[in-house]
């Protein structure tokens, strides 16, 4: 899977895995630019064309965060039954930004032929 690097090398050596924040000091000058213009999302288009991602689906998360979410949300691992995508369903229907405050949203929604269902 391709991804542009927007953080400096070794950005999490002291803190471990943490969410990116607005005006994150770990970003490089180029990283600030590509994030401001969402250029950092372009490699995901290639990942879709290569068949590694879907256009809509749950965003891939880093293993450190997956373990945290798995422990906190009983149905979190159901997200891994579908191919990862550029935006998740919540973003594409509500235009909401993914939470980056250090905790995940407590609601997971799925859409199927029979309708939309959400669980906490």
Image (tube, helix red, strand yellow):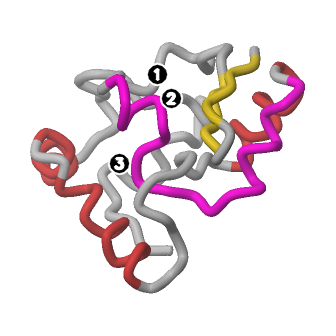
Pair 2/3: label in front? 2
Q: Is residue 28 left or right of residue 110?
A: left
Q: Do the residues bearing badges 1 and 2 touch, measured as CB atoms within 8 Å?
A: yes
Which quadrant holds residue 4? Answer: bottom left
| Residue 96 found in image quarter | top left
**In front: 42, or 92?**
92
Secondary structure of the residue carrying tag 1 is loop
Q: Nearer the viewer, mark 1 or mark 3?
A: 1
**Looking at the image, which residue is at 17% across and 56% down?**
39
Depicted 72 relative to depicted 27: above or below? above
Residue 16, can we see it? Answer: no
- Please give left or right for residue 51 compared with residue 36 in the image: right
- x and y, in percent, of residue 20 in the image: 42, 31
Dot 3 corresponds to which residue?
Answer: 7
Q: Earlier in the sequence, mark 1 or mark 3?
A: 3
Q: Is residue 108 left or right of residue 26?
A: right
Whole-angstrom CA distance, mark 2 to mark 3, is 12 Å
Q: Quadrant of the C terminus?
A: top right
Q: Residue at x 77, y 56 (%)?
A: 81
Q: Which residues are magenta?
A: 74-94
Q: Was residue 81 drawn as part of the magenta stretch in this picture?
A: yes
Magenta region includes residue 108: no
Q: Position of residue 21 (x, y in %)?
A: 36, 23
Report if residue 49 is visible in the image. Answer: yes
Q: Give the secondary structure at mark 3.
A: loop
Pointer 1: what residue? 100
Residue tagged by mark 2?
19
C-alpha gap between disc 1 and disc 2: 6 Å
| Residue furthest bottom as drawn | 50
CA gap, disc 1 to disc 3?
A: 16 Å
């Amino acid at each position: 899977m391709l991804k542009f690097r927007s953080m400096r090398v070794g950005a999490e050596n002291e803190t471990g895995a943490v969410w990116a924040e607005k005006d994150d000091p770990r970003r490089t000058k180029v990283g600030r630019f590509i994030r401001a213009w969402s250029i950092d999302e372009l490699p995901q288009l290639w990942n879709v064309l290569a068949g590694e991602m879907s256009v809509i689906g749950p965003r891939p998360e880093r293993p450190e965060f997956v373990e945290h979410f798995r422990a906190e949300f009983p149905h979190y691992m159901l997200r891994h039954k579908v191919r990862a995508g550029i935006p998740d369903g919540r973003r594409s229907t509500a235009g909401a930004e993914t939470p980056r405050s250090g905790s995940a949203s407590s609601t997971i929604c799925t859409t199927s032929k029979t309708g939309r269902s959400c669980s906490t």
